[in-house]
Image: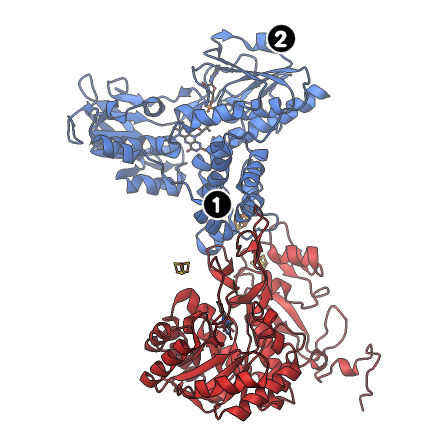
Amino acid sequence: MANSPMTPGIAAARLPEETLEANFADLHPPLDGHEATVAADRCYFCYDAPCITACPTAIDIPLFIRQIAAGSPENAAKTIFDQNILGGMCARVCPTETLCEEACVREAAEGKPVEIGRLQRYATDTVMEKGEHPFTRGGPTGKRVAVVGAGPAGLACAHRLAMKGHDVVLYDAKPKPGGLNEYGIATYKTVGGFAQAEVDWLFKIGGIETRYGQGLGAGLSLDALAEEYDAVFLGIGLQGVNALGASGDDKDGVRDAVDFISDLRQTGDYATLPVGRNVVVIGGGMTAVDAAVQSKLLGAETVTMVYRRTRDRMSASEYELDLAASKGVRIVTGAQPVAVHGNGAVTEIEFAYVHAGPSGLEPTGETFRLPADQVLKAIGQKLDGAPEGLVLDGGKIRVDGKGRTSRDGVWAGGDCATGGDDLTVTAVAEGRDAAEDIHRALLA
Amino acid sequence: MADLASDFVGIKSPNPFWLASAPPTDKEYNVRRAFDAGWGGVVWKTLGFDPHIVNVNGPRYGAIWGADRRLLGLNNIELITDRPLEVNLREIKAVKRDYPDRAMVVSLMVPCEEEPWKKILPMVEETGADAVELNFGCPHGMSERGMGSAVGQVPEYIEMVARWCKQHTRMPVIVKLTPNITDIRYPARAAKAGGADAVSLINTVSSITSVNLDSFSPEPSIDGKGSHGGYCGPAVKPIALNMVAEIARDAETAGLPISGIGGVTTWRDAAEFLALGAGNVQVCTAAMTYGFKIVEEMAAGLSSYLDEKEMSLSDLVGRATPNVTDWQYLNLNYVTKARIDQDLCIKCGRCYAACEDTSHQAISMSPERVFDVIDEECVACNLCVNVCPVENCITMEELTPGTVDARTGKVVEAEYANWTTHPNNPSAQAAE
Ligand SMILES: Cc1cc2nc3c(=O)[nH]c(=O)nc-3n(C[C@H](O)[C@H](O)[C@H](O)COP(=O)(O)OP(=O)(O)OC[C@H]3O[C@@H](n4cnc5c(N)ncnc54)[C@H](O)[C@@H]3O)c2cc1C
Ligand SMILES: Cc1cc2nc3c(=O)[nH]c(=O)nc-3n(C[C@H](O)[C@H](O)[C@H](O)COP(=O)(O)O)c2cc1C
Ligand code: SF4
Ligand code: SF4
Ligand code: SF4
């Protein structure tokens, strides 16, 4: 090992190989059969269960858990996939503590919900490890649909359309499918190349032709797609990043957190990834937490996450903030970056304390500096390159409850569209529902 | 600490916890360890004449488990002891000599003729044992040979054998009853008529625990086949409690000492058997599941309970018997309604599903998931109480006399009134 956490500047291989391997292992190891039976036994099979309502894809949770308890994990998986074809990924990445498990009656009763996420993983893994795909395509409809973006929204939409018998052509600007499942989600949430394996498994439905490296705006136009296909679905996510708005933010060592994470997800060897000795992450969401935690896991000596508002306004859940704290990430709130210092490369970053005033955040007059070799910006993604002619709303493509955009024959869902939280599971729900509406429209 | 010393038909033991006749009492090694662990007595594994029987050489037990592998019911196809008579007798004598303060009862099963009984009883007497228990209960293997439950199912045989035994030994005779019968009072009455000093019950319940859905063999499977076995453990306790109570409150057998057996797992189970009229209890499955050490919990638990209630052991015996009655004597003017404690309710909706789908549509559900009892519909069946996952969240509240039952529109009466005088009863007797 050439370097250590103390090595100045930005350096790779700060920790031994074995430590890196262990650091990036499964955050929640899978349940074995007996653990699953015991965990399933805790479910009360609630009437009109609140956990179902809390799941954006409305999986019939009591039913699938009962199927696990009765020793039929395959049937449990079918129950899950009926509603959520990416149930395997969602089992790993959903912030269950703010979704189904928060709503679980046992959370209210004991602060210890039924482990819905881990049970969902148990069921879906059982089927996926066997390579079985539980759905078959309906008879051909002769209709062709273009799905742009192979992230969770696009994948869910494509699968549902293919299942209904439509021919789907799935475009993505990137060389690999998966969207943020492949490039964004924290490494320790989806280990072992799961994202690609899941996509391969999903394509077993048949009827989905893939065209990677083809982007809307880069060779493809919405008009041309609308012309060629019977319907178009857009699931292009949020490709732009917000600007920091502090002087000197173009210095070396200042980076978008999503790019940093994307490198992490694509590497075959963590020891090759450089990370600062002192890392400062700016932001208060899931991306900020993931960037901070993974910097620490790569061997940064200090990692500080700085957010401008109060802790309760952070979009990262309490669970994630605790996870960050447990890995040694320091969390500072109520501070906003004003200047990045350093000669060519960042060495320090200066913050102003702020508090909420009548006209937004106001400086308190107090400032402080943190040593920083690396600054990761996680202050939100935004829609980039929305096709012309679509009405936007709050920076996103406006859609109605069925996913219809302002343009006839064009649907959208996932992060790029209005409505719902920016979560994998929400993207799946929106993609699926848009497919149902497209199906209705095409057969009308 | 309450004194747990027990005297059951003259058999003294330091506590009322005996090990039932079964594998835990099958040999000297086990019984010495049991006594060292604190068991008050044992009923030695059932003896028969040589040539000794043989057991299967594959699995003899099947089981029912809860989700976390808690053993809820056990089933066995074991027979009586498979060791020579002489070896057992020698060991019984040695153990009794070394543990004179413990109860040593010897279980017996020989053919249903006077000679064999007349022959074996003196052999047992010679060991210094305190009593014999006649195994009329074993439901498998031995019954096909005209012994065990084949005898226990015919009251005349029970009476006959009990009488022979009383004639041929000075030892107390306990008759062990099988539950595989329609009315337990008949065999108990027969035992009493034959002069038995006590009855013990229950032996195991005929059962098939499960079927293998791949091989289609009953479990436990012996080369692809299975036969019915005897069921015991926590699952059989309710059956055993009822049978003990039936005998305790039957006019013909009232006062006949009872040794309570069947699913005793903790001190609470033991206390319930005692309250229903058992003079002591015997334990098999719980010891086979957890080992001998459980007797420490049982003794300490019973003792604290007696202290707390300021009762002696004998005060407890039969305390609940007078409260066991027949359905037609239950007070029909006792009216209750389910009450939901909204602070405890976790809004699972199980009470609603149960009542709405399968009972009386007496629980309402609001859009905010508030569950309320509809007094106009509630018949007080208790199903919601039983399915609610939160203890004491739903309780039954007694309507005070003078108030109106919203379901029937009738004023609740203070007087006791039962079915025998109810106007809907075709054979109701006049009230006066
Ligand atoms: C770092 C990070 C961590 C996250 N962690 C979690 C988490 O733990 N749990 C959770 O639920 N959510 C998490 N999220 C959010 C979640 O990843 C997104 O909500 C989800 O991926 C949105 O799915 P989508 O299909 O709308 O978009 P994306 O996943 O962004 O997919 C969009 C796809 O469209 C393609 N594309 C974009 N533009 C074009 C174009 N012009 N032409 C063709 N193709 C295009 C992209 O290449 C991409 O493949 C995280 C997000 C980030 C950034
Ligand atoms: C494996 C096994 C063997 C048994 N053998 C005998 C026996 O030889 N004689 C007898 O009277 N009862 C026998 N029994 C019945 C027990 O003594 C006891 O009556 C029954 O198991 C119920 O008690 P429990 O629920 O505590 O196990 C046996 C029970 C088991 C489990
Ligand atoms: S709320 Fe919890 S207990 Fe109720 S059905 Fe859902 S997982 Fe089961
Ligand atoms: S309990 Fe002992 S005798 Fe019985 S199967 Fe297991 S190891 Fe063999
Ligand atoms: S079963 Fe109990 S906890 Fe559940 S809703 Fe009914 S009263 Fe509430």
Rendered residue at 52%/87% (across/down): B118
Q: Is mark 1 within 8 Å of ligand 3?
A: yes
Chain letter of the blue region: A
Residue A307: where, in percent of width, then height? 33, 34
Chain letter of the red region: B
Circle number at residue A227: 2
Residue A369: quarter of image: top left
Tell me the quarter of the image containing the N terminus of chain A.
Answer: top left
Q: Chain of mark 2?
A: A
Residue type for callout 1? Glu
Label 2 packing within 10 angstroms: few (<14), some (14-19), many (20+) = few
N-term-proximal mark, 1 vs 2: 1
Is residue A366 visible from the viewing direction of this image? no
With respect to residue A386, does A96 lie above or below?
below
Residue type for callout 2? Glu
What residue is shown with label 1? A101
Residue B324: quarter of image: bottom right
> Which one is nearer the viewer's eye here, A422 or A247?
A422
